[in-house]
Image (cartoon, rainbow, N blue to C red):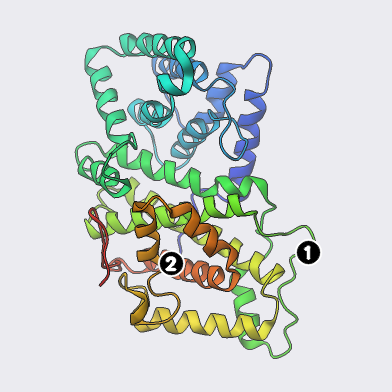
């Protein structure tokens, strides 16, 4: 199956730059910002006014706050909404949910302080009054579902999203766009790889006797540890979410979900390909070592290694990686574990090559699923 990405890395970077340019203005032009977010989406004048009210909430809440990568905090909800507009035909409720999906998680009294929190809540109250009781209640219910604050962990939070999928499908669409934005976010700090064909590189490594190795030029480099950990974390989260959707039969609950499901899988492939190529370009440069690694991963995958979560003693070095990651998350040591993985470049490269196969399997095989990943967490098969 050929599935085109919903947005290329280059388009994502351009969208981010345009939004950031508008946000950097001494006086933000709300209409211009709205036009950028909406892109091809066509909403009526009344809906546009409500979206401008929502911008007031976000600007009061996020103000000048930065994300961990240094980009404005407000950029994430704006960009997630923009991705939604470029993927489906959104309703007003779609866009309100997307713009405010992190409100209860990020814009808290503890994070903002009394004054800013009061300004944000005042703007939010104005928005709810203009929506009216019925739509305001619907919006608050959806924000509650999307807030990642479940004391039982990430899988329990995703379970809440899944439970709402059939009655509130826009929640599922928003969550998939949220994951898409987070997956691409790390790439803003690095040059793109569009002109480097991953599959051509793999063919040359495997079949061309005197292939000289992957050469991406001097301006390509591996991300630093913090960025690498963030990207690996996003890929693991994508794998978990796609697995849960497929396991519960929700990956095709409607046409928009099916489109976004495949789009997120393609995004995971692109980011994993980038890491693999950067690794072959900078650290594992010997073609014989690359060939052996590709064949090792091929054998692992075709022998059923990606069919279920297994313990280390059932197979090779790749076995147990998912289980180890989720156990580390529950123990509060996920970042440490991912940092160790990122610094172990051979194991990292094996892992991202496996990610490529897993995401491709989700796209190409409608029956593919990973046994052992469910709402209760991850268990070994």
Looking at the rendering, which quadrant does residue 43 occupy?
Answer: top left
Disc 1 secondary structure class: loop
In the displayed structure, 70 sits above or below 288; it is: above
- Real-space Cα separation, disc 1 to disc 2, in angstroms: 28 Å
Residue at 37%, 41% (x, y): give it: 175
Residue at 46%, 66% (x, y): give it: 355
Q: Is residue 203 left or right of residue 164?
A: right
Instruction: Identify the mark nearer the N-term, 1 or 2.
Output: 1
Q: Nearer the viewer, mark 1 or mark 2?
A: 1
Q: Is residue 283 left or right of residue 92?
A: right
Residue 203, horizontal then vertical, whole percent: 61, 80
Task: Kindly identify which residue carries mark 1.
Answer: 217
Disc 2 secondary structure class: helix
Packing grade of label 2 (10 A; few <14, some 14-19, many >=20) is: some
Looking at the rendering, which quadrant does residue 293 occupy?
Answer: bottom right
Query: Residue extending furthest right?
Result: 218
């Amino acid at each position: 199956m050929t599935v085109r990405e919903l947005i290329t890395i280059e388009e994502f970077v351009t969208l981010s730059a345009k939004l950031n340019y508008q946000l950097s203005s001494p006086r933000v032009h709300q209409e211009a910002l709205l036009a950028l977010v909406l892109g091809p989406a066509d909403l009526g004048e009344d809906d546009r006014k409500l979206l401008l009210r929502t911008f007031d909430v976000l600007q009061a809440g996020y103000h000048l706050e930065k994300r961990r990568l240094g980009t404005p905090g407000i950029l994430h909800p704006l960009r997630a909404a923009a991705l939604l507009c470029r993927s489906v035909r959104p309703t007003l409720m779609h866009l309100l949910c997307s713009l405010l999906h992190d409100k209860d998680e990020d814009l808290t009294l503890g994070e903002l302080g009394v004054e800013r929190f009061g300004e944000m809540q005042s703007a939010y109250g104005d928005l709810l009054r203009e929506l009216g009781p019925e739509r305001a209640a619907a919006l608050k219910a959806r924000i509650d579902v999307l807030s990642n604050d479940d004391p039982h962990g990430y899988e329990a939070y995703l379970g809440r999203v899944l439970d709402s999928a059939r009655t509130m499908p826009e929640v599922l669409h928003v969550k998939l766009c949220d994951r898409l934005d987070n997956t691409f976010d790390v790439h803003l700090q690095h040059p793109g790889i569009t002109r480097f064909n991953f599959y051509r590189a793999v063919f040359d490594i495997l079949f061309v006797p005197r292939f000289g190795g992957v050469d991406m030029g001097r301006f390509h480099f591996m991300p630093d540890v913090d960025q690498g950990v963030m990207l690996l974390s996003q890929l693991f989260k994508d794998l978990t979410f796609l697995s849960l959707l497929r396991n519960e039969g929700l990956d095709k609950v409607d046409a928009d979900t099916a489109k976004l499901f495949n789009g997120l899988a393609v995004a995971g492939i692109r980011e994993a390909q980038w890491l693999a190529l950067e690794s072959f370009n900078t650290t594992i440069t010997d073609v014989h070592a690359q060939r052996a690694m590709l064949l090792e991963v091929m054998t692992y995958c075709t022998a059923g290694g990606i069919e279920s979560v297994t313990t280390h003693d059932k197979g090779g070095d790749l076995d147990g990686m998912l289980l180890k990651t989720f156990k580390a998350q529950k123990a509060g040591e996920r970042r440490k574990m991912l940092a160790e993985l990122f610094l172990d470049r051979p194991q990292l490269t094996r892992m991202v090559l496996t990610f490529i196969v897993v995401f491709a399997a989700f796209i190409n095989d409608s029956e593919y699923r990973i046994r052992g990943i469910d709402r209760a967490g991850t268990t070994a098969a």
